[in-house]
Image (cartoon, rainbow, N blue to C red):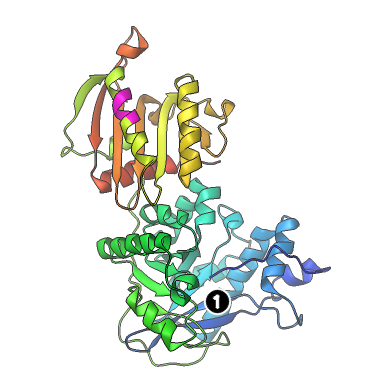
């Protein structure tokens, strides 16, 4: 759980707070709601040597000074060092937050702590929807890196913003952390829709649901009713130093490997997909149909597309994608030279001329309960543009749509 207040305290010596050794993390217990066992901890940044220091204000000041990534690494390394010194081991899980601004930044010079943590700790990185919305490609790389080292992924604050649902297929989180508003209040219709999607995703993937902010028996009952098996909050344990506790009877967040990111959407297809040959006019009608579904889905989906060249991102397409961006949490478009044609709220990235994706046309719509994609490969015809032929498939196979969308997402850098 991360909360950063926009109000910035009078922090005149940020160096004192950002430097190594300044942060002394507190660890809040994470509890199995059935057995009552302490199965892990979330590391929370604290500055006991600077009385009255507010973590939200420190992060706000660091953001204004352009030092968020530096502060984030300081807090993360302090959390790992504290757990290693205590001997937390791999039987319990350590949850560590990652700020979006720190994604893709270089590891500090002293990487020995990270090496030891990979070997001796079971770490879960907590990410928020802000990270994917700001830095899609970097976030996917962080997820791949974490899983390659045996670390897990948690999606934080789910329920606070419907946009968080859009991330579930891309991150495939091991843990879904419910925002405390779901636990403490009767869900609104929008939140009920979110919870239905969360329960569906958990059922399909085995992701663990964790409820935050449990402070009363009523909160606990609500958390259990929402499908949570893990929880944290003052009723279950206050933040503080790590303490000895009985070893959990079972692993609560098993390690999983991330599927590789396909080179292109067409490369993600297997022999099971029936390929057809059609002309551009037909494929355009199919793509328009798939895009139109995104305007009516609830919760709103992610829309990602590759257009080969910017000249094919026509004014009519720009207008459609601007409308989609007003409705959907994340809309992305890729093409050679496309950054010369920015569209408000649409993540556009230019493809290199030698990118194999240049030979393909893809439109992917991925929502909580709907998935569809047009995946096509240009056959290289001469002649009128409208008559160009493509080898293509239209698919509603969710795994394939996810693979295609992840391949596009990995290229969206802005």
**From the viewer's perspective, is residue 254 above or below residue 314?**
below
The outermost residue toward the top is 383
Q: Is residue 39 visible?
A: no
Q: SS for tag 1?
A: strand
**Quarter of the rendering occupied by the C terminus:** top right
Depth check, front residue: 132 or 377: 132
Please state the extent of the stretch shown in magenta in the rendering.
284-288
Disc 1: CA contacts within 10 A as few (<14), some (14-19) or many (>=20): many
Residue lying at 33% horizontally and 23% vertically, measured from the top left = 284
Q: Is residue 223 visible?
A: yes
Q: Would you identify the image quadrant in which residue 112 lies?
A: bottom right
Question: Magenta stretch containing residue 152, yes or no?
Answer: no
Question: Magenta stretch containing residue 286, yes or no?
Answer: yes
Depth check, front residue: 95 or 394: 394
Left or right of residue 376, residue 113 in this image: right
Residue 240 rendering spot, x and y as whole percentages: 58, 87
Q: Would you identify the image quadrant in which residue 391 lies?
A: top left
Left or right of residue 63, residue 402 in this image: left
Magenta part mainly helix, strand or loop? Answer: helix
Residue 141 rendering spot, x and y as whole percentages: 46, 51
Q: Which residue is mark 1?
A: 43
């Amino acid at each position: 759980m991360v909360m950063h207040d926009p109000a910035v305290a009078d922090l005149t010596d940020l160096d004192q707070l950002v430097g190594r050794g300044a942060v002394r993390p507190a660890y809040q217990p994470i509890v199995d709601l059935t057995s009552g066992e302490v199965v892990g901890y979330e590391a929370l940044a604290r500055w006991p040597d600077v009385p009255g220091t507010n973590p939200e204000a420190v992060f706000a000041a660091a953001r204004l000074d352009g030092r968020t990534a530096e502060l984030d690494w300081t807090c993360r390394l302090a959390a790992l060092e504290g757990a290693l010194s205590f001997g937390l081991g791999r039987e319990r899980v350590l949850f560590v937050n990652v700020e979006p601004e720190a994604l893709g930044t270089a590891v500090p010079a002293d990487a020995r702590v990270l090496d030891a943590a990979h070997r001796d700790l079971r770490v879960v990185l907590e990410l928020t929807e802000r990270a994917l919305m700001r830095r899609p490609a970097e976030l996917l790389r962080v997820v791949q890196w974490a899983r390659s080292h045996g670390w897990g992924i948690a999606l934080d604050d789910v329920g606070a913003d419907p946009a968080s649902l859009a991330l579930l297929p891309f991150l495939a989180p091991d843990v879904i952390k419910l925002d405390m508003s779901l636990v403490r209040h009767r869900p609104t219709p929008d939140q009920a829709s979110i919870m239905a999607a969360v329960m569906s995703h958990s059922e399909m993937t085995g992701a663990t649901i964790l409820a935050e902010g449990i402070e009363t028996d009523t909160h606990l009952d609500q958390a259990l009713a929402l499908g949570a098996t893990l929880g944290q909050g003052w009723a279950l344990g206050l933040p503080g130093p790590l303490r000895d506790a009985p070893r959990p009877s079972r692993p609560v967040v098993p390690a999983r490997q991330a599927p590789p990111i396909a080179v292109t959407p067409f490369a993600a297809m297997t022999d099971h997909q029936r390929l057809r040959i059609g002309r551009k006019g037909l494929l355009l009608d199919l793509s328009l149909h798939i895009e139109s579904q995104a305007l009516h889905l609830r919760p709103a989906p992610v829309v990602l597309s590759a257009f080969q060249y910017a000249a094919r991102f026509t004014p009519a397409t720009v207008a459609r994608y601007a409308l989609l961006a007003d409705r959907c949490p994340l809309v992305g478009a890729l093409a050679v030279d496309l950054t010369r044609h920015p569209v408000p709220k649409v993540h556009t990235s230019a493809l290199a001329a030698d990118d194999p994706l240049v030979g393909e046309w893809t439109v992917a719509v991925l929502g909580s309960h709907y998935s569809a994609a047009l995946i096509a490969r240009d056959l290289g015809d001469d002649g009128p543009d409208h008559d160009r032929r493509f080898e293509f498939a239209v698919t509603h196979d969710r795994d394939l749509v996810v693979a295609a969308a992840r391949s596009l997402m990995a290229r969206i850098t802005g």
